Image (cartoon, grey):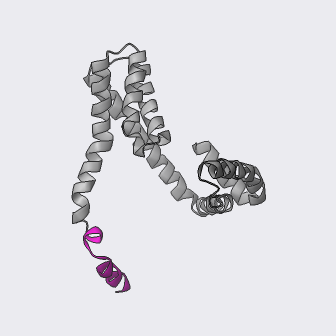
Amino acid sequence: LVGAMATIMIIGRKSPEVMIGFLRPIENLVNRISQRFRKGKAIEPWVDSVVESFGEAAGQIAKNPKKAVLVFLFSILASTCELICFCLVGVAFGLSIPSALVGGYVVATLFAMISITPQGVGVVEVAVIALLAAYGVNTATATAIALTYRGLVFWMPFVIGALFIRRTRSFSQTPEERSRQLRA
């Protein structure tokens, strides 16, 4: 996914016509399928705006390469921390198969990205349990690992954020108060 988006960004910046020519048939196919299911209603055209947006993003990255590299390095660090978290949870529950630990993390991350549910809620847990079961981990242990990991990296930050969002000044103000503050 990241490689496809990077390719669209680069081609969209260097020669947007090529990218539009490549994506237009996909847009037409999606539109035809959509019209069959939506009783003749066409979807909004999206190719031009996607190519323009990705081209602008590539331009911003080209203008600020040091920031882009820094963001990339921080994302690698964050992913490494999540991998360590998954491995430590697995080890805490007695799992010592390195390929199962790394594979479980990869499956959790992948299904969080591609799932039809927001952040893969429900899907990630089942996918991790299935992968760990394929490695011979008993279902109870696999379930404990999946739920503990998701509790630590998804549910705990979500709940803390939900509780404290009202304490954040910008969220506790009315729209009028926010606009007044912006004008001042």
Instruction: Please name the residue shown 26% across and 74% down the image.
Output: 173
Q: Where does the image place residue 111, in percent across and percent down from the top left?
A: 46, 36
Residue occupying the far top of the picture: 136
* Along the viewing direction, whichever of 124 and 69 lies nearer the viewer: 124
Instruction: Please name the residue shown 27% across and 32% down the image.
Output: 148
The boundaries of the magenta stretch are: 169-184
Numbered label tally: 0
Position of the C terminus, as image quadrant, is bottom left
Instruction: Identify the image quadrant of residue 183.
Output: bottom left
* Along the viewing direction, whichever of 142 and 6 lies nearer the viewer: 142
Determine whether 123 is above or below 24 in the image.
Answer: above
Position of the N terminus, as image quadrant, is top right
Residue occupying the far bottom of the picture: 184
Q: Is residue 183 magenta?
A: yes
Instruction: Please name the residue shown 74% across and 59% down the image.
Output: 16
Residue occupying the far front of the picture: 39
Determine whether 129 is above or below 157 in the image.
Answer: above
Instruction: Identify the image quadrant of residue 161.
Output: bottom left
Instruction: Identify the image quadrant of residue 136.
Output: top left
Q: Where does the image place residue 157, in percent across and percent down from the top left?
A: 28, 48
Q: Where does the image place residue 57, in percent across and percent down from the top left?
A: 60, 60
Left or right placement of residue 26 versus residue 165 in this view: right
Q: Is residue 179 magenta?
A: yes
Our reading of the magenta stretch's main secondary structure is helix
Left or right placement of residue 91 versus residue 35 in this view: left
Q: Where does the image place residue 66, in percent across and percent down from the top left?
A: 54, 57
